[in-house]
Image: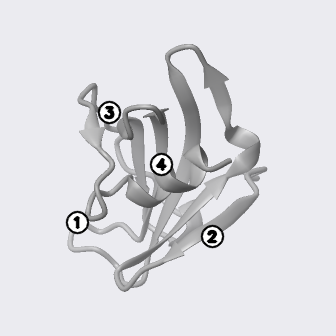
């Protein structure tokens, strides 16, 4: 499977690096949709090394939903995929939240 995403690094953390694909941005009346990729420095205890997340972002309220989360055994979204998960819960994009860097970067575009 060939990935056509053009991942741009938006944060270099101690546990994982965060990427987004600006070509995936889709602005709708109910929010901005964007893909992000979390590339973990070390294999996680649950057996994954990276995760792709589809975000729904409300820039006005600085909050987000993770509409789809899929983990992968390899770096940068490669390798065996896990079972996709989703959340319908809005989370605030506070500095320690998982979506903070994605929301901050996307809303600045």
Measure the C-alpha gap from mark 4 to mark 3.
18 Å
Q: Secondary structure at mark 4?
A: helix
Q: Earlier in the sequence, mark 4 or mark 3?
A: 3
- Residue 22 drawn at (x, y percent): 72, 48
Residue denoted by label 4: 103
Examine the rendered structure and indicate whether residue 35 appears above or below residue 60: below
Q: Are marks 3 and 2 in contact (CB under 8 Å)?
A: no
Q: Earlier in the sequence, mark 1 or mark 4?
A: 1
Disc number lying in front (1 or 4)? 4
- Residue 6 drawn at (x, y percent): 76, 57
Measure the C-alpha gap from mark 1 to mark 2.
24 Å
Examine the rendered structure and indicate whether residue 66 appears above or below residue 106: above
Q: Earlier in the sequence, mark 3 or mark 2?
A: 2
Q: Secondary structure at mark 1?
A: loop
Examine the rendered structure and indicate whether residue 28 appears above or below residue 84: above
Measure the C-alpha gap from mark 4 to mark 2.
14 Å
Measure the C-alpha gap from mark 1 to mark 3.
17 Å
């Amino acid at each position: 499977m060939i990935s056509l995403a053009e991942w741009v690094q938006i944060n270099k953390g101690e546990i994982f690096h965060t990427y987004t694909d600006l070509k995936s941005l889709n602005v709708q009346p109910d929010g901005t949709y964007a893909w992000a990729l979390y590339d973990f420095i070390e294999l996680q205890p649950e057996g994954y090394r990276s995760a792709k997340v589809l975000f729904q972002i409300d820039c006005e309220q600085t909050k987000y939903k993770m509409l789809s989360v899929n983990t992968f055994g390899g770096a940068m979204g490669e390798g065996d995929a896990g079972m996709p998960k989703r959340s319908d819960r809005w989370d605030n994009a506070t500095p320690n939240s998982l979506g903070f860097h994605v929301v901050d970067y996307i809303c600045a575009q």
